[in-house]
Image (cartoon, rainbow, N blue to C red):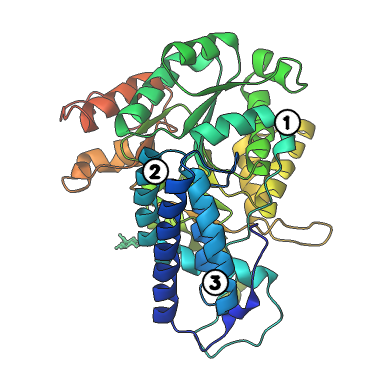
Amino acid sequence: MMGRRDSALMRKDTGQSIRRSRIAAAIAVGIFLGCVFAFFYPDGFFVSTPPIHHSVDISNSEIASSSCKSSERINMLKSEFVAASNKNAELKKQLRELTEKLRLAEQRKDNAQKEVLVLGEQQKAGPFGTVKGVRTNPHVVPDESVNPRLAKILEKVAIKREVIVALANSNVRDMLEVWFTNIKSVGITNYLVVALDDDIANLCHSKDVPVYKRDPDEGIDSIARIGGNHEVSGLKFRVLREFLQLGYSVLLSDVDIVYLQNPFDHLYRDSDVESMTDGHNNMTAYGFNDVFDEPQMGWARYAHTMRIWVYNSGFFYIRPTIPSIELLDRVAGRLSREKAWDQAVFNEELFFPSHPGYDGLHASRRTMDYYLFMNSKVLFKTVRKDSKLSKLKPVIVHINYHPDKFQRMKAVVDYYVNGNQDALKPFPDGSE
Ligand SMILES: *[C@@H]1O[C@H](CO)[C@@H](O)[C@H](O)[C@H]1NC(C)=O
């Protein structure tokens, strides 16, 4: 469905306002027909249905197509909408979601246009300053046969085909409890724990936490139970692949992370990988020109280098695209062959360009705002001492820079949730 694109989108006689009004018209007609059909078919007439998310995606991407296309689109909106609303109560919820979608239409329209570019015909470059490359690759076609059991779980848990995923075994049980307690209290429901042992599966069941336990006879599963950190890291990328193949965007999350707001309200969704950074200021987080000095070279003593602090492979949003899946395969493949740190491999695959004997990945990437998606160095070295910054509430705090994770997680909750101004004070900037 995502592959159905129309190069007519790029016709230049369609201004933005026409597009906007066509979205609005298409959605309005869709809503109306949805209501009519929901009335006559309260139980729906399709069993499985793609989520609303996609219908709006498609409508945005095709808003400028010819009018015969638009009736097709309305049909699609209609049927998807009807199928999604099995009950009248649910219909209302879907309506609210559609309204929310409309609000995000601007952002998505831009993305969708770029997806069209990927599949569109050759074209001339536009005038100076109007040309933009592609960073939003199209979704893969979902393949449920990859893992029907997981597909069922995700149908229930995901919202707009998005889900937070954490892998956990008994070693991180305490942190996991803080993790899901905060996720719940922020009001997030689309999250899933991949339990790597029975203890974690039982904990999740007892606390009403959505959980997915892999089949014990699955080959990579033995790694999960007996494996150290290194092997489990490799496993993470293999498990993630299935989520992407099923057509879901995943916000992969370590468990040493405190959720203070809903991260899905703060994503751009325009890149294959959108990741939090290990950087601590604009330069280190977003990239800078680092000048290397070699005085004996005289006139040419300065060599310019590109630097950026690594992406944190414990918290990133990954869209279900071919480059994303290639990334996971490349990282998992290398981790199975080399003794390497998964975060280093993740970054090397993301950033190194093609060169003789090597094909670079060329996935698109976006660095998250380091004050919203905050690492624990930023919090303990800078933010807690700054009268302005310390009053802003981040979306998440990742205790990635400190070994006393559990204590610092609880302190972060105490500071941001309970309002205890002294909660962060006992801790040193780094580890002692
Ligand atoms: C860092 O970058 C942001 C925009 O990305 C800008 O608003 C801010 O002023 C910059 N801060 C510094 C210290 O340069």
Look at label 3 and name its amino acid: Ser
Query: What is the residue that sits farthest to the front in this orientation?
Result: 40
If you read the primary sequence from the N terminus, does the residue marked by circle 3 or circle 2 appear first? 3
Q: Does residue 197 lie above or below 1 as drawn?
A: above
SS assignment at label 2: helix
Q: Nearer the viewer, residue 128 or 217?
A: 217
Category of crowding for the residue at label 1, using alpha-carbon neighbours closer than 10 angstroms: few (below 14), some (14–19), many (at least 20): few
Q: Name the residue under label 1.
A: 339
Residue visible at 44% across and 10% down in the picture: 206
Cα separation, mark 1 vs mark 2, equals: 33 Å
If you read the primary sequence from the N terminus, does the residue marked by circle 1 or circle 3 appear first? 3
- Residue 14 on image: x %, y %: 49, 84
Q: Can residue 158 be seen in this view?
A: yes
Look at label 1 and name its amino acid: Lys
- Residue 377 on image: x %, y %: 37, 38
Does the residue at mark 1 contact the one at mark 3 (Cβ under 8 Å)?
no
Q: Nearer the viewer, mark 3 or mark 2?
A: 3
Ligand 1 positioned in quadrant? bottom left
Instruction: Tell me if the residue at label 3 has its CB under 8 Å from ligand 1.
Output: no
- Residue 368 on image: x %, y %: 43, 51
Q: Mark 3 points at which residue?
A: 70
If you read the primary sequence from the N terminus, does the residue marked by circle 1 or circle 2 appear first? 2
- The quadrant of the picture occupied by the C terminus is top left
Q: Name the residue under label 2.
A: 263
Q: Nearer the viewer, residue 167 or 430?
A: 167
Q: Nearer the viewer, residue 214 or 273?
A: 214
Q: Which of 91 and 21 is in front in this view?
A: 91
Category of crowding for the residue at label 2, using alpha-carbon neighbours closer than 10 angstroms: few (below 14), some (14–19), many (at least 20): some
Q: Can residue 374 be seen in this view?
A: no
- The quadrant of the picture occupied by the N terminus is bottom right
